[in-house]
Image (cartoon, coloured by chain):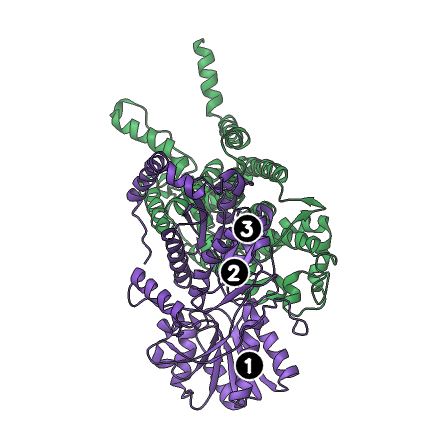
């Protein structure tokens, strides 16, 4: 290869588009070919479940990694998306024929147990599949919009925002558990069977759902990448690192934050809906505070600045969870704890940060002779930004 | 505690087990054939379950971690004891039982995942597991889809019946109706106050209780209140009870809330000589947390108490304490869990097969005369015929049995009570 050719390749490799394409292509290869070829259906179905959490993690990369908005309540949106899908499936499973043993046939079984005699009004529209499909992203987005308007317009951010999102997670899980006649309570919505008469529990359906999930996930990653490459993505970074300066430049910071928060909510909701389809039920145990924090951990393990890394992070943590709990049923929580501590201590930038860490280590070893490690523009390092005067206005 | 090998030990154990199995098949072919010869594997296992000439593998699926671990540990222990005893007495159809334990982690989706793992991956012949209704609801579709067999130990709300489940605990009517009759007869109760934790089991149980009180006993329900799981402030409820002066309080407060509920009753001066309270949700296990002195004289309606005076139970309690320590406590569910492996053994031997369909068909009519609770029989609806006992709480944390009903037919879909 000529010298000029080499430099062209180098130049290409340096452009973000090429780099993104490469990592997304590798991810696609892993999800579409490697995993299905290496795993039996049972394990593949589990991977499919792990990948539904990856939607949340990808959303968190946008909103937390780039936007600097730490949400500890993403389970709310995952859960809402899942519930929207589950409500449709439950209504289909509760036709009068298969529920004729109930006092009121034709309504979901848990309503009958709770002495409801008619379908509640807010359940009615979920008889339509189109409505349910639209509700999956839109209901969570609407909630995110309300939360966003209430918080960001009042310049609530940082730790206070994280605490507020936890409150929402707690409120929603208490609401769902308390209103069991309308929501299935702590049992969740169970025993989902068919989608338009198509049995979602068969082996063929599981394969198909796995691939639908995979396509949606890659689409989500690509969409996230595209968003970050637009001007909006740059602004997002800017407002994370110097919010006041972006505001003084004439941008309405709150609107950008609301948008990225809603986007992350929609991503999570799609994951929730796919979870319902693949696992066959939805339960309030995803909506609470603990699962929401777990979802942040997936992102942290994968690397909060890497969309692709977030997917690997979700896979790794959940695989670890399944593996450790199968092997050591009574000690596995300690292993998971150890894993998290190790990740934070050894590679603070997550899996995706490993390459950068490796480069830095090599540069350090070769001393001053080599070139300095290329600065990673996305790193949230305030010292890297030259300071123009004092940072007034920030308390 | 359970004899859990350390991580390295368990890897070693696995290796040792493989070698031992090889040796076993090599050296003991003759006796093994003699035992299982009458039941060749090809004949007793036509659906590809984990059954070999010498070993049958079963699953155990409870919460070993999380909030439910404290309740489910007793069931894990009892099932292990039963399986150990079966192995000592020669196994099932000449085969030794091996256990694959999975942790449901008090998380319902995890229960579903692990159930699928046990059935699809490990092909276990039966699963002993679950505790809460929510975990059972989560795994039920898996068991029905993959055609597995679940032995479920907890008393529960009923309204369910499956070919793939044997319910070794009581369904709601078995625990409620005889208890209310006893209250009406011996305590002359006419005015009842119903309380419960806010989820499906207490609500369904109280629904049945209310119908029975109003339609059969012609009494009156003067109050009905529910509290979230984990609730610890019962002051206002206690005031309402003092105000309404019911003849009896019917309590289905569940889990950790019980500690606050009974302690606050005592602190408010509501003692057993002033107020009759009957609970269906406090076993000897819960009294450990509540403290026997806080419950003295109150009543519980269960099918089993550790203090039951019969030979089966004395042997069971002695074996349990020998294995798990002399302070080990046995509650109603623990005993029901102990029945699971024995009922499965009886069904397999009756069917002459490990096939799930054949076990499901053979189960109705099976009797167990060695049950610690006395005698049980499996009904066509896969629940057990059982007696109801009323126990009076003692300061040492045990119940004194003061009433025993006849055998009650299980009726998970009670007409007129829904």
Pointer 1 residue: B180
Q: Measuring from the top left, give residue B207's x and y in whole percent.
A: 61, 74
Q: In percent of the image, x 64 and y 70: which residue is there? A: B414
Give the mark toward the camera: 3 or 1: 3
Q: CB atoms at circles 2 and 1 under 8 Å apart? A: no
Q: Can residue A258 be seen in this view?
A: no
Q: Which of B63 and B48 is in front in this view?
A: B48
Pointer 2 residue: A168
Give the mark toward the camera: 3 or 2: 3
What separation in Å lies between label 3 and label 1 (alpha carbons)? 39 Å
The disc numbered 1 marks a residue on which chain? B
The disc numbered 3 marks a residue on which chain? B
Crowding near the residue tagged with mark 2, few <14, some 14–19, many ≥20 C-alpha atoms within 10 Å: many
Pointer 3 residue: B351
What separation in Å lies between label 3 and label 2 (alpha carbons)? 54 Å
Q: Report the label total.
A: 3
What separation in Å lies between label 2 and label 1 (alpha carbons)? 42 Å
Q: Quadrant of the N terminus of chain A?
A: top left
Can you tell which chain is drawn purple? B
Relative to A367, B334 lies left or right: right
Crowding near the residue tagged with mark 3, few <14, some 14–19, many ≥20 C-alpha atoms within 10 Å: some
Relative to A248, A138 lies left or right: right
The disc numbered 2 marks a residue on which chain? A
Instruction: Say which label, 3 or 1, has the lower sequence index.
Output: 1
Which color was chain A given? green
Q: Measuring from the top left, give residue B75's x and y in whole percent.
A: 42, 60
Q: What element carries label 2?
A: helix
């Amino acid at each position: 290869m000529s010298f000029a050719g080499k430099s062209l390749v180098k130049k290409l490799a340096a452009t973000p588009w090429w780099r993104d394409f490469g990592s997304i292509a590798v991810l696609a290869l892993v999800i579409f070919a490697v995993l299905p070829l290496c795993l039996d259906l049972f394990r593949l179905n589990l991977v499919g479940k792990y990948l539904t959490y990856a939607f949340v993690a990808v959303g968190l990369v946008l909103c937390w990694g780039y936007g600097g908005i730490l949400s500890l309540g993403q389970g709310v949106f995952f859960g809402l998306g899942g519930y929207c899908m589950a409500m449709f499936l439950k209504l289909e499973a509760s036709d009068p024929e298969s529920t004729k043993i109930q006092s009121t046939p034709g309504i979901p079984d848990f309503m009958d147990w709770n002495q409801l005699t008619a379908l509640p009004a807010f359940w009615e529209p979920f008889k339509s599949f189109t409505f349910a499909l639209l509700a999956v992203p839109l209901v969570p987005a609407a909630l995110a919009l309300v939360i966003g308007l209430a918080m960001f317009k009042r310049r609530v951010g940082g730790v206070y925002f994280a605490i507020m999102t936890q409150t929402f997670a707690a409120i929603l899980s208490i609401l769902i558990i308390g209103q069991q006649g309308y929501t299935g309570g702590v049992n969740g919505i169970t025993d989902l069977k068919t989608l338009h008469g198509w049995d979602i529990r068969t082996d063929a359906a599981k394969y198909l759902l796995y691939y639908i999930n995979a396509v949606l996930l890659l689409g989500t990653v690509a969409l996230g990448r595209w968003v970050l490459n637009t001007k909006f993505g740059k602004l997002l970074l800017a407002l994370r690192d110097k919010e006041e300066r972006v505001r003084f430049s004439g941008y309405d910071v709150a609107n950008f934050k609301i948008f990225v928060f809603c986007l992350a909510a929609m991503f999570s909701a799609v994951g929730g809906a796919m979870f319902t389809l693949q696992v066959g039920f939805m339960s309030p145990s995803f909506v609470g505070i603990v699962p929401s924090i777990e979802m942040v951990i997936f992102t942290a393990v994968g690397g909060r600045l890497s969309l692709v890394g977030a997917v690997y992070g979700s896979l790794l943590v959940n695989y670890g969870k399944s593996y450790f709990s199968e092997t050591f049923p009574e000690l596995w929580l300690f292993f998971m704890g150890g894993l998290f501590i190790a990740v934070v201590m050894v590679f603070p930038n997550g899996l995706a940060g490993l390459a950068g860490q490796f480069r830095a280590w090599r540069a350090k070893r070769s001393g001053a002779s080599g070139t300095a490690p290329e600065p990673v523009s996305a790193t949230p390092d305030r010292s890297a930004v030259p300071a123009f005067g004092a940072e007034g206005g920030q308390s | 505690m359970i004899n859990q090998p350390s991580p390295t030990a368990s890897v070693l154990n696995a290796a040792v087990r493989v070698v031992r199995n090889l040796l076993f098949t090599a050296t003991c072919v003759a006796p093994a054939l003699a035992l299982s010869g009458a039941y060749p594997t090809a004949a007793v296992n036509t659906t590809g379950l984990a059954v070999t000439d010498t070993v049958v593998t079963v699953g155990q699926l409870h919460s070993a971690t999380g909030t439910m671990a404290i309740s489910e540990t007793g069931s894990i222990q009892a099932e292990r004891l039963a399986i150990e005893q079966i192995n000592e007495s020669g196994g099932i159809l000449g085969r030794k039982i091996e256990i694959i334990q999975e942790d449901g982690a008090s998380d319902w989706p995890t229960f579903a995942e692990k159930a699928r793992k046990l059935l699809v991956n490990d092909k276990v012949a039966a699963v002993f597991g679950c505790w809460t209704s929510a975990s059972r609801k989560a795994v039920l579709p898996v068991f029905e889809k993959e055609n597995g067999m679940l032995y479920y130990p907890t008393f529960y709300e009923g309204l369910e019946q499956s070919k793939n489940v044997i319910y070794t605990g009581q369904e709601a009517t078995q625990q409620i109706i005889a208890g209310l009759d006893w209250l009406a007869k011996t305590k002359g109760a006419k005015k009842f106050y119903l309380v419960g934790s806010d989820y499906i089991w207490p609500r369904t149980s109280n629904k049945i209780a209310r119908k029975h009180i109003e339609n059969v006993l012609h009494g009156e329900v003067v109050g009905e209140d529910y509290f979230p799981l984990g609730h610890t402030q019962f002051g206002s409820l206690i005031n309402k009870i003092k105000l309404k002066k019911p003849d009896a309080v019917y309590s289905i407060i569940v889990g950790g809330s019980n500690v606050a509920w009974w302690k606050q009753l005592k602190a408010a001066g509501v003692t057993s000589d002033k107020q009759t309270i009957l609970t269906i949700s406090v076993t000897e296990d819960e009294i450990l947390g509540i403290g026997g002195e806080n419950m003295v004289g109150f009543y519980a309606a269960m099918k089993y108490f550790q203090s039951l005076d019969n030979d089966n139970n004395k042997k069971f309690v002695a074996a349990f304490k020998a294995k798990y320590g002399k302070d080990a406590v046995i509650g109603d569910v623990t005993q029901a869990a102990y029945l699971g492996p024995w009922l499965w053994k009886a069904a397999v031997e009756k069917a002459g097969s490990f096939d799930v369909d054949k076990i499901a068909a053979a189960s109705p009519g099976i009797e167990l005369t060695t049950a610690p609770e006395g005698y049980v029989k499996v009904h066509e609806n896969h629940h057990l015929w059982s007696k109801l006992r009323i126990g009076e709480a003692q300061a040492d944390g045990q119940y004194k049995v003061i009433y025993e009903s006849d055998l009650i037919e299980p009726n998970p879909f009670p007409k007129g009570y829904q």
